[in-house]
Image (cartoon, rainbow, N blue to C red):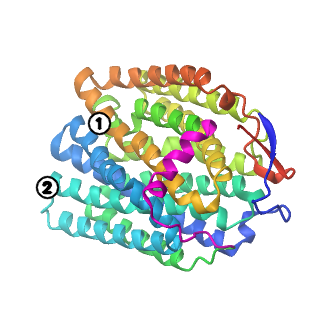
Amino acid sequence: MEEVSLPEREQPTGTGSVFREPAYVRFWFARICSTISFQVAAVAVGWQVYALTHSTFALGMVGLVQFLPMLLLTLVVGHVADRFNRKTIISICQVMEASTLGLLAVSSYLQQLHPFGIYFAVAAIGAARAFESPSTQALVPGLVEDAKVPQAIAWSTSANQTASIVGPALGGLLYAFGPHVPYGLCACLFATAAVLSSTIVPKRRTAGKAPVTAKSIFSGIHYIRERRNILGAISLDLFVVLLGGATALLPAYARDILHTGPWGLGLLRLAPAVGALSTAVFLAHHPIRNRAGHRMFAAVFVFGVATVAFALSRNVWMSMAILCLLGAADVTSVVVRSSLVQLETPDEMRGRVSAVNSLFIGTSNQLGEFESGVTASWFGLIPATILGGVGSIVIAMIWMFLFPDLRRLESIAGPAADDKVEVAN
């Protein structure tokens, strides 16, 4: 480890709230609208699919069909994010998501919706999010100074979690009036997010016209492979969430283990967001400036233990408390990883690197849902969840030895305190 100056980065012009930047404010509210919509839709889709099929495997398929477009489009979306206006990409994707959910609302109202129709809609949303996610990640550093990037990422995470608190509860409540009601609300919220995104004026240019060559297509993968700290952080998240994705099974837990209805599912999905939001707000005011690596690994251990505890719980309120702790641990890892990736990547590469990072996130989330559904159908709901929690702990222990520099990483606060940041060669 050594001190490396950052001559190519914009040096800090002072400290202060990121909400003094109008562009960031619009981005933040658009983020809330889109995430609320996504969370409401997730509750409606999960409950509707399980109601139609009574199958944990079918729940897992929802994650798979959402992940496949991201896998197939990864190398394309990175170049798109680096060659074209990122805010325009985001707003177009949100319009597509609004249109798809509008069709789901109409089909559900007419009672003409088959599970395969839901899978097709989820795949379309997955394709839109494949373009939207890397553009969103790469856009943030262009809205604020480098010194404020960790704060901006923490507040962006808090926007996600705020929406994740409102969304599941709202989705469970509205589903009682029929699935067309939450789908219709989702369409309106995505449309609002599209309008807000289209009016963002970045603080500085955020995308260049990178030439398309065989080398540049794979440059995001090469960049991550050459930087061990980044590779270790995002691969840790990949395997931990892939194994510990208990949230995909919440409809089954709500219905078969805890014996609640859609309202209970909404509360269970709300709980991790409460823990994540409180932690994200804390980290926005108190950025991690030392022992970042140790804190990230500690958070992963807590995540694994909480997953096992959730599997053993038989009380809905105890399960909510455990999920709250799980969310707090997860968001700590997210802030460390996201800050590290964005601050260690030059702007002209952020689209391609963010695309690969989004693939890792999508693999851990959507493919993790498929893995959870399959293992639950093989071993049973509770054994599969326990296995995932134990697996997360084992992966964290292995990664501590495979990536010692990541374990010893001190700060991800960027140049907030001075003009240098500690990174690994």
Q: Position of residue 118 (x, y in %)?
A: 22, 56
Q: Is residue 398 above or below residue 99?
A: above
Q: Is residue 49 above or below residue 315?
A: below
Q: Quadrant of residue 24?
A: bottom right
The amino acid at mark 2 is His
Q: Is residue 71 left or right of residue 343?
A: left
Instruction: Give the camera-side residue of 49 and 214.
Output: 214
Residue that numbered label 2 is attached to: 114
Q: Quadrant of residue 80?
A: bottom left
The amino acid at mark 1 is Arg
User: Crowdedness of circle 1 by 10 Å Cα count: few (<14), some, many (20+)?
Assistant: some
Q: Is residue 398 left or right of residue 38?
A: right
Residue range of the region highlighted in magenta in the rendering: 204-229
* Quadrant of the snapshot with the C terminus: top right
Can residue 303 be seen here? The reply is: yes
Residue that numbered label 1 is attached to: 255
Q: Position of residue 412 (x, y in %)?
A: 72, 44
